[in-house]
């Protein structure tokens, strides 16, 4: 029986922990009920061969495949389902309900319910056993098996864990694998069960810098709970009335192709199991040097490539021959691929200025942009070529907006919870880059820089990294845990750079050496400023705009419809929707602002992702949506109220306009990096959001900024040309 699911993760009234925004939503979802047990499934992709990502041990749900579904769903029809005992599927109480045969039968039930005639089965850990059993039961339904970190009943000694009996009495003070014990889970209380989860997932992700993967799995493990996990484990081991049938004879009889992938540092099940499985099945063996047990999450790029290549090789007849062309090297036009962070339009503006200067140095250069909204809208307005694959990028702006509440955005946590999106977008970049470029420029394209360092063999062209800040820094509200996490992320980056110093052909800091914060990367790590000076070239600030002088401002104001005798306040919060609460606060303060500044005209610009109708109407307030010429309004105004983003505040600084800026709470970049730079320039008046919520306090600050002479340092204007010169050398 199949029923429709209103939303993922809601079967039987259960809601699941979300480790972050999804890179792709399922194209279909539902619940099949087999012998009274609900099985919640999802389908990604609408064309191509079928791939089924099987459940694993019910300590985690199917979201453990989150780094695979978006990428594979662009090439195949990918089905996942929560195994019984996990996520939104049913949680039977008895051990017999969790035997290997039950999971195999569940798989066939999902295939039947979703209309999958045959598929490549991908198993992780315990899921490998179920893939083999499905292939034994219905060989006509299985095109091939990818077996990752196999944990199945093969006759291979595992001395690191076999000294402890799962169904025996617990040790007096258990530690390590002694905590893999039914009585310990059930009798030691939540703290004891948590101790086991922390131990187990620490072994599952034995690679350094795996904090996010461990954190996600800990929450999922707590959702499963000790009682269910005990029943699941008893069913797998053949205890408490369950029956465990041998797997090795089935492996010997397999006739479908098999790819075995196993990490050499797997601390849950040693690579000897993968080697034995490959021997029994006649399968191909890929040993991942240094890899642990959670390869799909920890080495997603490798796993995605291997699944795709295997599935294409074994699934059905070959497609019709494709028509191809090949251009000899000297006949190819020079091509550059630019990637601009969508978190703020300032990246795209400065990158477009750099690209224009680069074209002047290399006439005929083709520049493509892999970009998403709102950057794509900005670039198309400028006549730039946005690569058609951009339509498949997962939205980073939407994710950041979902993480924000009332002008409060923990930027580090938001980036950390964007990991699924970053993997998916890197996989898309990797495919686009394979078409052949002479240069790749990543302006805070975090996923590209990170995963190229993790997979240096995928670098195909000179790569230039641009950024206007260096170092993840903790905010006070983040406490000790955030201090540890930011230091860990910084340490990983430092290790990447030390191990692969040539991966970036140029590292460019958009600013001056003095703009780097005088802080440490973390305990025992270098000082950020000292390290950055040794690693980066400094371009000075790159705005992509020419400052407007006082002699030009009058003509600009007239062209924009601003009278000479009216003071104009422009309010802007950038290219995302996180600034909506501030815009509403400013709208509420307009009467007080007009009392404080006689005749004040307030021009509020919502930007590309906020509906102007979301701003309440006020006398003296005019509201605009996306303005492609916003920079002109900022240059012409008498005072501005903005967020704490670098691009807008430096644009105002370059134009010597007074402004009030209100950094997002808990946004480390705006509160630390940007504020340090603005303080160095002597620009702007910083206002805490709590004060900005008081209309009279906000009005007083605007009036003060309007009447205070601007004495900020001048901003360099040759940054774009300087960067273009460095890029030209690589072409």
Image (cartoon, grey):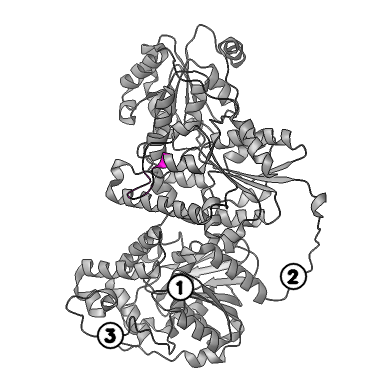
Up-down relation of residue 232 to residue 323 (above or below): below
Determine the residue located farthest toward the left in the rendered image.
Answer: 172
Q: Which residue is the site of mark 1? A: 55
Q: Position of residue 401 (x, y in %)?
A: 45, 43
Residue 319, numbered circle: 2
Residue at numbered disc 3: 165
**Residue 343 image position (x, y, % from top left):** 50, 40
Label 3 sits on a secondary structure element that is loop
Q: Is residue 513 above or below residue 275?
A: above
Q: Between disc 3 and disc 1, whose residue precedes?
A: 1
**Left or right placement of residue 180 versus residue 613 in this view:** left
| Element on which disc 1 rests | loop
Relative placement, left or right, of 15 versus 73 is left
- Which of 233/146 is in front? 146
Per the rendered image, the range of residues in magenta is: 519-529
Q: CA distance from mark 1 to mark 2?
A: 30 Å
Q: Residue visible at 66% across and 37% down?
A: 380
Q: Is residue 554 above or below residue 243?
A: above
Q: Sort mark 3 into few (<14), some (14-19) or many (20+) by Cα contacts within 10 Å.
A: some
Q: CA distance from mark 2 to mark 3?
A: 52 Å
Front of the two marks 2 and 3: 3
Q: Is residue 623 visible?
A: no
> In this rendering, which labeled residue sits more in front, label 3 or label 1?
3
Secondary structure mostly seen in the magenta stretch: loop
**Residue 524 painted magenta:** yes
Q: Could you say which is closer to the camera, residue 710 or residue 729?
A: 729
Q: Is residue 244 magenta?
A: no
The residue carrying pointer 1 sits among few (fewer than 14), some (14 to 19) or many (20 or more) residues within 10 Å by Cα, namely many
Q: Quadrant of residue 550?
A: top right
Residue 549 lies, in percent from the top left, at 57, 14
Q: Nearer the viewer, residue 10 or 269?
A: 269
């Amino acid at each position: 029986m199949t029923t429709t699911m209103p939303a993922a993760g809601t079967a039987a009234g259960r809601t699941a922990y979300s480790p972050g925004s999804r890179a792709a939503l399922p194209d279909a979802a539902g619940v099949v009920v087999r012998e009274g047990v609900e099985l919640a499934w999802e389908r990604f992709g609408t064309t191509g061969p079928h791939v089924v990502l099987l459940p694993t041990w019910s300590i985690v749900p199917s979201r453990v495949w989150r780094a695979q579904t978006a990428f594979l769903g662009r090439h195949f029809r990918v089905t996942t389902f929560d195994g019984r005992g996990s996520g939104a599927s049913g949680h039977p109480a008895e051990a017999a309900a969790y035997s290997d045969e039950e999971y195999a039968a569940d798989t066939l039930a999902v295939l039947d319910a979703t209309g999958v005639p045959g598929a490549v089965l991908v198993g992780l850990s315990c899921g490998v056993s179920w893939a083999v059993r499905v292939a034994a039961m219905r060989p006509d339904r299985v095109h091939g098996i990818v077996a990752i970190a196999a944990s199945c009943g093969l006759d291979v000694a595992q001395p690191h864990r076999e000294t402890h009996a799962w169904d025996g009495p617990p040790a007096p003070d258990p530690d390590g694998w002694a905590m893999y014990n039914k009585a310990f889970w059930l009798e030691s209380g939540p703290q004891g069960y948590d101790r086991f989860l922390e131990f187990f997932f620490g072994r599952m992700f034995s690679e350094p810098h795996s904090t996010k993967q461990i954190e996600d799995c800990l929450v999922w493990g707590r959702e499963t709970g000790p009682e269910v996990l005990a029943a699941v484990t008893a069913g797998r081991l053949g205890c408490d009335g369950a029956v465990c049938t041998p797997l090795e004879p089935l492996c010997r009889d397999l006739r479908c192709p098999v790819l075995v992938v196993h990490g050499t540092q797997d601390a849950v099940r040693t690579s000897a199991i993968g080697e034995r499985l490959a021997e029994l099945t006649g399968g191909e063996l890929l040993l991942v040097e240094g890899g642990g047990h959670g390869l799909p999450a920890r080495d997603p790029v490798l796993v995605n490539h291997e699944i795709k290549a295997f599935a294409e090789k074994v699934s059905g007849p070959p497609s019709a021959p494709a028509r191809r062309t090949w251009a000899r090297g000297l006949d190819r036009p020079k091509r550059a691929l630019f990637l601009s962070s969508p978190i703020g339009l300032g990246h795209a503006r400065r990158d477009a200025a750099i690209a224009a200067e680069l074209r002047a140095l290399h006439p005929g250069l083709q520049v493509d942009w892999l970009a998403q909204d709102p950057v794509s809208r900005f670039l198309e307005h400028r006549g730039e070529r946005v690569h058609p694959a951009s339509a498949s990028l997962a939205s980073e702006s939407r994710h950041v907006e979902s993480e924000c509440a009332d002008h409060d955005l923990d930027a580090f946590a938001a980036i950390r919870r964007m990991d699924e999106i970053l993997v998916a977008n890197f996989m898309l970049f990797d495919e686009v880059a394979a078409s052949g470029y002479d240069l790749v420029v990543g302006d805070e394209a975090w996923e590209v820089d990170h995963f190229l360092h993790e997979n240096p063999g995928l670098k195909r062209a000179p790569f230039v990294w641009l950024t206007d800040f260096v170092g993840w820094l903790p905010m006070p509200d983040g406490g000790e845990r955030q201090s540890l996490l930011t230091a860990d992320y910084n340490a990983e980056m430092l290790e990447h750079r030390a191990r692969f110093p040539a991966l970036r052909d140029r590292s460019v800091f958009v600013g001056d050496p003095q703009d780097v914060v005088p802080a440490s990367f973390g305990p025992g790590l270098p000082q950020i400023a000292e390290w950055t000076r040794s690693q980066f070239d400094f371009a000075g600030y790159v705005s992509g705009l020419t400052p407007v002088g006082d002699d030009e401002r009058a003509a600009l104001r007239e062209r924009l419809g601003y009278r000479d005798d009216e003071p104009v306040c422009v309010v802007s919060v950038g290219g995302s929707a996180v600034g909506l609460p501030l815009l509403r606060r400013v709208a509420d303060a307009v009467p007080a602002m007009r009392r404080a500044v006689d005749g004040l005209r307030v021009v509020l610009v919502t930007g590309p992702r906020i509906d102007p109708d979301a701003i309440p109407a006020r006398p003296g307030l005019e509201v605009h949506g996306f303005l492609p010429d916003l920079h002109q309004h900022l240059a012409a105004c008498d005072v501005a109220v903005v967020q704490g983003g670098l691009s807008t505040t430096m644009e105002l600084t370059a134009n010597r306009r007074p402004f009030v800026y209100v950094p997002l709470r808990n946004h480390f970049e705006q509160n630390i990096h940007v504020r340090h730079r603005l303080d160095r320039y002597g620009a702007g008046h910083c206002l805490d959001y709590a004060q900005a919520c008081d209309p009279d306090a906000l009005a007083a600050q605007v009036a003060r900024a309007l009447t205070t002479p601007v004495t900020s340092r001048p901003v360099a204007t040759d940054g774009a040309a300087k960067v273009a010169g460095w890029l030209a050398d690589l072409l």
